[in-house]
Image (tube, helix red, strand yellow):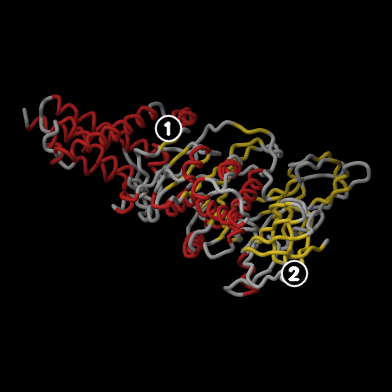
Amino acid sequence: METYYVHGINGPVISVRGGRHLPMMSLVYVGEQRLPGEVVGAKGDTTTVQIYEDSAGLMSGQPVYSTGLPMSIQLGPGMIGNIYDGIARPLRELEARSGALLKKGMSLPSLDEERKWEVAVDIVEGQQLEGGQIFARCKESLIIEHRALVPPGVSGIANQVKPSGEYRVGDVIAKIDCGRGKMIPLTISQTWPIRRPRPSMKRKPIDRPLVTGQRVIDTLFPIGRGGCAAIPGPFGAGKTMVQHQLAKWSDADIIVYLGCGERGNEMTQVLDEFSELSDPKTGRPLMERTILIANTSNMPVAAREASIYTGMTIAEYYRDMGYHVALMADSTSRWAEALREISGRLEEMPAEESFPAYLPSRLAGFYERAGVMDTLSGREGAITVIGAVSPQGGDFSEPVTQNTKRFIRCFWALDRSLAYARHFPAINWTTSHSEYFGDLAPWYEENLGHGFTELRRGIMNILQEESQLLEIVKLIGADVLPDDQKLIIETARMIREGFLQQNAFHKSDTYMPPENQKTIIEVMLYLFDSAKKLTALNIPISQLLASGIFSKVSRMKFDTENGIKLTDYMGLVDDAVNKVISDNS
């Protein structure tokens, strides 16, 4: 391992004099404490390194050790249910060794190298192997099977194949004869550079939604499985809460939850909740299909910049096994702030609001790693990315939000006024949008029955008309509106309170399957159409409101435990309308 020496120190940015042979983006260890770092620049005889630790105590002249290898993480069984820092060091193991306050320079492997796994070997001696092929399996948790993969780019003949049995992550199970005397060992773990996307066979079109159980998302603004969504919103609007709900209830196989620059108590809440929460799929703890990456606001800023690539690399690894992975990044604004701080220390030319000029390309490189893929293993896998954005003051025109909108197709804009009114999720239905619905419409029609697209359009039209009428109401009041417009306002209120608003802490309201969502909007639109009969007969809509039918329909979302019966509620609507008509005849 070649040695160089520190020349200058500027926070986490270290200059190394005479480091001409340090490869770009390679891993180095800095100082007597061997702080991990990455080569990020070179100019003349000076090389620039960013370290993933606090530089306090580091001095000029201390050694810099080169590995010549890119910044990589170890992938293998044992990641499910674990919690890592931004560069994939296991935090539980670090705590066990150093206590609650982590010591600098502690470098531990991502995986437990002493634990033995019961491995089923799927290959035989002399078999032709290709990169990405599954050659062994083991049970990583009670619900996740870990599928060991031949490293991408490696192919040859299986040699010295061992039988099924107990193995550590570093034990050689077989060797691949690549020809010309080159033998590559196969283990159930592998190392991969975090900044390099893992290869796949083919990107596939998005044709089915990520079912979340959140009505405003599944019905109005769906995200496709393998798509990208952004959740922008000011402080206190509920970004983290929405991501918690999606992590708990979405139909992804594996959740990678990335806390990037957020408060430590939020990550503690995730750990506590996910450990106690029962997975609706299996009844087991949700942590048995979850991986947490925590780089909280008090952790080194350079590691925050690397954390999203660590999370994406882990997600791609499980995608290559044939799983659908949902990656929650909370928040990309904090990651962009880390990028800005490091860029300033590197004395790079700033762009808008001092963010680096390469902010858009970095965002694009992150979001474009999502998608539905035919993997090298021959299975279909997908990564869905949901990134929270925290614009200062709720200003959606700032650079991170605007550049994020360029690379995503689903935009869930959170509204502070809705959040303060205790309307959850606080997704504003007039400023949010989803471009996926056109691609997903065939799935909805096939799985929920013909007519779902028209029902959704009817809901959206009523909400849009209400937003226009409210501007008039502000000027002249609601009393002077004609009854047909009063009906729109009352129906929109029913939709907002009875459909869009959802109680995350209510047993039967926290999650609702799409078929029940369709039933609710069918009843609400049936009530709207039935009430039009009264306005056509010049009967005041106030009489129908007095019957309480609007309130009954608003509360039907709480009947999911007993099963919502469409005919029962339609019968209630017919009875209420017919009674009003008979009273006026």
Outermost residue toward the right? 181
| Between marks 2 and 1 in the image, the one whose residue lies nearer the viewer | 2
Bin the neighbour count of mark 1 within 10 Å (Cα to Cα): few under 14, some 14-19, many 20 and up: some
Residue at 40% of width from left, 55% of height from top? 235
- Can you tell which mark lies on residue 62? 2
Quadrant of the image for the N terminus?
bottom right
Q: Nearer the viewer, residue 52 or 539?
A: 52
Query: Which amino acid type is shown beneath numbered disc 1?
Result: Leu
Q: Amino acid at mark 2?
A: Gln
- Cβ–Cβ below 8 Å for labels 2 and 1? no
Question: For the view shown, which residue lies furthest in the top direction?
Answer: 536
Q: Label for residue 34?
A: none
Q: Position of residue 307 (x, y in %)?
A: 60, 55
Image-based side of 546 in relation to 34, left or right: left
Checking the image for residue 448, the label placed there is 1
Earlier in the chain: of badge 2 and badge 1, it is 2
Label 2 sits on a secondary structure element that is loop
* Element carrying mark 1: helix
Say which residue appears at 34% left-offset and 30% top-offset.
Answer: 455
Distance from label 2 to label 1 (Cα)?
Answer: 66 Å
Coordinates of residue 158 in the picture (x, y in percent)? 85, 44
Q: Measured from the top left, where is residue 273 in percent x and y?
A: 47, 61
Mark 2 Cα shell of 10 Å, populated few (<14), some (14-19), many (≥20): some
